[in-house]
Amino acid sequence: MVEEILPEVIIKDLGHDGRGVGKLSGYTIFIPGTLPGERVRARLVKKKKRFGEALLEEVLEASPHRRKPPCPVYSECGGCQLQHMDYSFQVEFKQDRLIQALYRIGEAQKLPSPRINPAGNEWKYRNKATYHLQGNHVGFFSRQSRRVIPHEECALLPVAANRIKKSLAGLLKQKILSSGKNFTVRTSFSHQQSLLILDESIKPRVSWEKVATILRKENPELVGIYQQGKGKKPGREIWGKSRIKEKMGDYTFELGPATFFQVNSEQREVLLKRAKQIVLELGCRNIGDLYAGAGVFGINLAKYVDRVMAVEISREAVAEGKRRAQLAGLDNIEFHRGEVEKVFTKLPRELDCVLLDPPREGCHPNLWQLIEEKKVKNIVYISCNPATLARDIAELQPLGYRIETLDLVDMFPQTYHVESVALLEGK
Ligand SMILES: C[S@@+](CC[C@H](N)C(=O)[O-])C[C@H]1O[C@@H](n2cnc3c(N)ncnc32)[C@H](O)[C@@H]1O
């Protein structure tokens, strides 16, 4: 389509992904990088029947919450969406999103006011980043397309991750490594350790040993290089170890290339603290840790309860959970590998608290019947997506569950992602 400069637009609201929403003669227009109350000039780049998408040309009247984004590639890179918003307003936006989702999708009648847990650090908080490659370009995908936007330093990542990225980009430029699809850097916040995970298509022109020596010289915290397998084929350690240590709660875990772990190490501790507080206050004795990952919640809670049942689909995560439990001398936590919606039937009836921490897609619909059959008293739902949290709560309400407390834990500053913990009590 021919791009069109629009007449002045007034931003009324924010969409779920942080884009400003304005109207022109009743037609809705989404404009990234704008804030409610602002008057802007924008260029229409996509015209659909019900809404259009435009790019910001000029802010004519700025919101008091506007700030200069520190990242020079912010307007192009798809990694962040909220850098132009001051941090307290970001948190307000997320609180609003959570509440709106619970009222609209979750059909909640009455909600407790959420407790807000802003991030201690709004920068350099991420312990994991996947970089995309296009020739010698290394970076994240653009906001609009799958074009890679290179950057010098990402403001959300710690020094170690930025440095490894820079070294890798250097090796690609010098053709010591051939370009591929992507690589991931995982960095421990409690130990001086990083792990580099390459996709299967990245190949060295010298030995891997030589590549490791060059990388280690610039990145002494690098403990291993792992290469993923093609398709479903297993990957392999190509140098060093394929795990890094990270202290989570009271225990140190060893995380492999595929094991899920919360990307914000500091805020993960806030989640753990809240889960422990709930379990202790309610006096829970038998708990389920569903979608357990390596059992970070279950293992940390085991010493306060009689029994923990952890369920997780990933083999690598379950193996790590079992190993940690054994090393910690915990004999009251059991790991079950498989899909929650299938394995849950095998768990005992008398669970008085179940922690649900599903991926963004939320829980499987078959779970609700099992929760009802097992007469689970309390549910602690840890969610990274308000829309699926609300959808799942709408299923739980007819079964007699009500939201007692709600916590917003900002795990993802500068992005629109919302993490929350809801405590639901049964009738
Ligand atoms: C958001 S993560 C939470 C992990 C863990 N609670 C933590 O904080 O580290 C979701 C986890 O659910 C697992 N998962 C996804 N679908 C599953 C399913 N149907 N059944 C069991 N586990 C599943 C993923 O492998 C992942 O480890």
Image: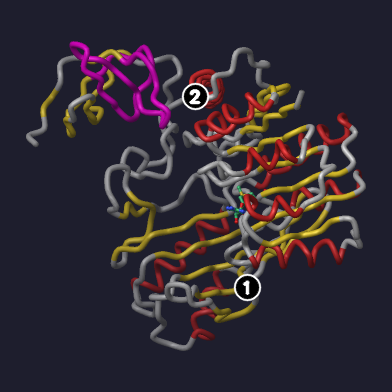
Q: Residue at x 51, y 64 (%)?
A: 164
Q: Which residue is mark 2?
A: 105
Q: Is residue 31 magenta?
A: yes
Could you say which is closer to the camera, residue 283 or residue 321? 283
Q: Residue at x 41, y 32 (%)?
A: 17
Query: How far across and down, in percent of the image, does residue 376 sit?
Result: 77, 36
Q: Residue at x 32, y 47 (%)?
A: 142
Could you say which is closer to the camera, residue 27 or residue 126? 27
Query: How far across and down, in percent of the image, does residue 322 sit?
Result: 78, 65
Q: Are marks 1 and 2 in contact (CB under 8 Å)?
A: no
Which of the 4 quarters of the picture holds residue 335? bottom right
Q: Residue at x 44, y 70 (%)?
A: 199
Near mark 2 (Cα within 10 A), the count class, few <14, some 14-19 or many ≥20, is some
Query: How far across and down, in percent of the image, does residue 207 sit?
Result: 47, 88
Q: Is residue 322 magenta?
A: no
Q: Which residue is mark 1?
A: 242
Quarter holding the C terminus is: top right
Secondary structure category for the residue under label 1 = loop
Which region shows up in magenta?
11-40
Side of 18 relative to 54 (left or right): right
| Amino acid tagged 2 | Ile
Secondary structure category for the residue under label 2 = loop
Near mark 1 (Cα within 10 A), the count class, few <14, some 14-19 or many ≥20, is many
